[in-house]
Each structure stands twice: as C-alpha cells, then as structure tokens.
C-alpha cells in the first residue's frame, strides 16, 4: 500500500482491537466474510432506485443481490416488507418520520437521558426540530430492582393528551426485555403508528434470545452492525400489522429513503448485510445470541456481588448500565471510562435513569457482551472482566468530580496520575493476555 499514513493507522487500529477488550454495547466484530464483501467490486457501482427500477444501467447483479438481501431479512424477522438501503440507523429513523408524519406532527419517544435515542425526538435532532416531540422517561423508583422500568400509566397519559402520530419503542441504554404488547395497547388506543427501534437487540431477536416486536408494531427499524454482526448499515421493516393499518406503508418508506433522503444505495454494504443475515439464520447464531445473554448475566452478577448498582437489577439482554454514584460520586462516569480504557477495557460513560449530573458528565457507565461473545468468551471470562472492572474502580475511588470551573485541571491531573500508576500497567498486561487468547475475526 502506497499511502503509508492510512495503512499505519489501519494497522494501529487492528492492534488496538486485537489487544483490547471491547465492551461498548453498540459495537461488535463483523465476520471476515462480511468484511470481505465490503471491499468487493460492488463498492464501484451506482444503483439509485430499487430492483428492476433503477436510474442507471449495469445493475443486473445489484438487483439480484438486493432482492436476495430483502428475502433473507423478511424470512429472518418474519415481515412482509423491508428496505435495506438506509445508510445507517439515524437516516433510517428519519425516513420513518418522513413516511408517516407531516412536519409539526406530534411524536413520542423515550428521552435520551433515560436511555432513548437522539432520533426518537430529541430537541437537537432533526426529528425534534421538524416534528413536535413529547418524550417519556423511565420510572425513578425501584430502578435497581429487576422490574419493567417503563411507567405505562404515564406513557398512556402523554399519548392521550398529545395524540402523537407515531410512538417509538426501543432504546440505546436499557438492560431489560421490552414489553411491546403494552406499548401497542397505548399506540392502538390513540391511533398512532408504533415503531420498534431494535438496533441494539436485533441479533438477540434473530437468535430467539429476546421477544420480537413484529406481532405488535407497525414498523421496525434496526442498524445491522450491533448484535446482528453485519456491516454499518440499517433496515426498515413493515409488519403485517403495519400493512393492515396502511397498505401503502412500504411504498411510503421506499419513497422516503429514495428520493426523499438518500442517493444511491451502498451496494457493497448490501452485500455485507446479506452475508450477515445468512450467518444470523444459521443454528449456530441461536447459540451465539443465547451466550450473549448468559455472558451479560454473569458479568452483571460479578459487578453486583462486588457492590455496584445495576439499573434493572442486572441484565436480560446484551447490555449493562451501572450507576457509580455510591462508589465514585455523581458525574464519575468519565473517571471509570478513562481508567478502564487504560487497562484495555473499552466502554462508555452514560446517564442513568435517576441521573443527578449531566449527559457530558454522567454518573454511570454502559457496557455490553456482544463483542466479547463474538470472540468466543464465556461466563469464566466475564468473571475475569468483572473482577478487573471492580479492581480499577477501587483504584480510583478517591477521585470525585469537582465543580465546573475546576474540572479540566482535575481531570488532567487524574490522567497523569493514572498513566503513571504501576497497578494500571500491571492490570493492562493481564487484560492484553486474555484478549490475545480470543482472536478477533
Ligand atoms: N451510537 C449508538 C449507541 O451507542 O447506542 C446509537 O446510535
């Protein structure tokens, strides 16, 4: 490769991924087959439009590929319609608004600070700027016990008051199973479209380790690169219930994606999604999905036994949300994220449902078990990883987030002290040793 600058960065990223342990719950390792087709000759093609209805010639192979991808998605998720062209999750979600709402229509979704997604109507997102969002939160009480954290009476009250055109169910930081039926009862009562954003749990649903929203909702959106283990992309599905509510819904979704929001589909990504869907339909994927959940439960148990507070009292999917306030004080997610990064464990700071700090300095961390499970790790390794997390948190327990004006200097001092800490270096070696025993694809 002539461009040594980029090549060197690729090699450095490969080393980081091989030697570290990835715990960010929205990430995963695509198989080498998925990565191979991403750099196939499909990368060179333009194919605006849909199969058999393109604006360019030379699309006979792309047509066959896109139809194959659609058929695999429909079969795997049990839906009559799918669009596999969205560039990623956020454009997919925006396309749903475009297909179902007029600018200014009322919409409802879970608040970002309570674990929802920006595109579910946050004020800084196009979805909150062009539409009129009314957001619901999680319960504030009993959030550390294993119980459904949604306050359905409050969601119903908001829906009846504001009559939204569409309601989102789905989150980026929720550790328990969703009760799609309860959301459907509310949406049906007010005549709203119910859209499930299954980006985080799509692989678990495909592998039978999480309930499917398909019987209860009208539309399903998902990214393809999280638990589903595909390339970075997304899909929008319309269910039988959705087509019954509006037989034109599939056409409206297609028009919203192209020409509404996007240009030509990324055909190399379509190839990667098709391969990922093939992999997810194999019986081995069922085992994989169930192992993700077992690993999450094992990691949750280690952390709880070590004195940490987990939202939802544990995990029923791939994701864990830890409130660090009792051990490191409010706003301490930043210390945990940085210190764990230095020992080779990558996760992200995150708000918790009863947050007392801010989204940039939240009191929790979010982690997940899909990437480690893809590497073949099991309960034993989760116990090791949980032990390391507890050890690191104990090492930093004297640090506290100061007032706003002192934060920059204090965090710089924390970084200097931690980088020089011998124990951090020793733990890093242990983590690296484990990582190298479980190669990435
Ligand atoms: N960035 C994704 C996540 O981390 O959950 C959502 O867009």
Image (spheres, rainbow, N blue to C red):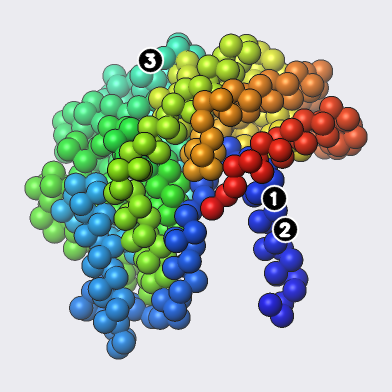
Foreground mark, 3 or 1, reads 1
Q: Residue 156 is drawn in which quadrant? A: top left
Is residue 308 found left or right of 342 in the rendered image?
left
- Looking at the rendered structure, which numbered label has been put on residue 147? 3
The answer, for residue 409, to whether it is visible in the render is: no
Asked if residue 220 is positioned above or below residue 276 in the image, the reply reads above
Name the element at disc 1.
helix
Name of the residue lying farthest toward the bottom: 57
Foreground mark, 2 or 3, reads 2
Q: For mark 1, what is the residue?
A: 16
Q: Nearer the viewer, residue 197 or 168?
A: 197
Contact, CB < 8 Å: mark 2 with mark 3? no
Callout 3 crowding tier (Cα within 10 Å): few <14, some 14–19, many ≥20: few
Q: CA distance from mark 2 to mark 1?
A: 6 Å
Q: Residue shown at 38%/32% (left/top)?
A: 290
Instruction: Indicate yes or no: mark 3 CB to ligand 1 under 8 Å.
Output: no
Q: Residue shown at 51%/46% (left/top)?
A: 28
Q: Nearer the viewer, residue 389 or 95?
A: 389
Q: Residue shown at 83%/34% (left/top)?
A: 425
Q: CA distance from mark 3 to mark 1?
A: 37 Å
Contact, CB < 8 Å: mark 2 with mark 1? yes
Q: CA distance from mark 2 to mark 3?
A: 43 Å
Q: For mark 2, what is the residue?
A: 12
The location of residue 362, given as percent across then percent down, is 63, 30
The location of residue 128, given as percent across then percent down, is 43, 47
> Disc 3 or 1, which lies upstream in sequence?
1
> Disc 2 or 3, which lies upstream in sequence?
2
**Quarter that holds the N terminus:** bottom right
Q: Nearer the viewer, residue 368 or 288?
A: 288
């Amino acid at each position: 490769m002539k461009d040594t600058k980029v090549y060197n960065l690729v090699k450095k990223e490969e080393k980081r991924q091989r030697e570290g342990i990835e715990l960010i719950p929205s990430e995963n390792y695509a198989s080498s087959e998925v990565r191979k087709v991403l750099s196939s000759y499909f990368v060179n093609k333009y194919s605006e439009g849909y199969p058999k209805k393109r604006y360019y010639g030379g699309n006979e192979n792309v047509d066959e590929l896109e139809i194959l991808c659609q058929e695999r998605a429909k079969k795997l998720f049990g839906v009559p319609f799918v669009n596999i062209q969205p560039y990623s999750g956020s454009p997919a979600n925006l396309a749903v608004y475009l297909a179902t709402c007029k600018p200014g229509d009322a919409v409802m979704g879970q608040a970002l600070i309570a674990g929802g997604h920006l595109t579910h109507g946050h004020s800084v997102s196009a979805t909150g700027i062009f539409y009129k969002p009314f957001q619901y939160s999680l319960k504030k009480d009993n959030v550390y016990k294993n119980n459904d954290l949604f306050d359905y009476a409050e969601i119903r009250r908001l829906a009846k008051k504001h009559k939204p055109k569409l309601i989102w169910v789905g989150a980026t930081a929720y550790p328990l199973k969703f009760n799609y039926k309860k959301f459907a009862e509310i949406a049906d009562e007010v005549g709203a479209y119910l859209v499930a954003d299954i980006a985080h749990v799509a692989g678990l649903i495909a592998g039978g380790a999480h309930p499917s929203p398909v019987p209860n909702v009208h539309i399903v959106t998902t990214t393809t690169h999280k638990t589903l283990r595909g390339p970075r992309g997304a899909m929008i599905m319309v269910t039988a219930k959705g087509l019954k509510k509006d037989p034109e819904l599939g056409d409206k979704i297609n028009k919203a994606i192209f020409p509404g929001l996007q240009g030509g589909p990324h055909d190399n990504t379509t190839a990667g999604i098709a391969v990922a869907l093939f992999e997810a339909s194999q019986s081995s994927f069922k085992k994989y999905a169930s192992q993700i959940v077992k690993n999450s439960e094992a990691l949750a148990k280690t952390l709880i036994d070590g004195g940490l507070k987990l939202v939802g009292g544990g995990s029923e999917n791939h994701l864990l949300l830890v409130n660090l306030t009792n051990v490191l004080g409010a706003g301490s997610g930043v210390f945990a994220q940085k210190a764990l990064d230095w020992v080779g464990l990558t996760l992200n700071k995150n708000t918790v449902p009863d947050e007392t700090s801010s989204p940039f300095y939240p009191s929790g961390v979010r982690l997940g078990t899909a990437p480690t499970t893809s590497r073949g790790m099991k309960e034993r390794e989760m116990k090791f990883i949980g032990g390391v997390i507890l050890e690191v948190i104990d090492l930093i327990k004297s640090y506290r987030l100061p007032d706003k004006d002192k934060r920059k200097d204090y965090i710089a001092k924390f970084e200097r002290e931690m980088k020089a800490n011998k124990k951090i270096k020793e733990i890093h070696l242990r983590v690296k040793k484990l990582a190298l025993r479980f190669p990435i694809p």
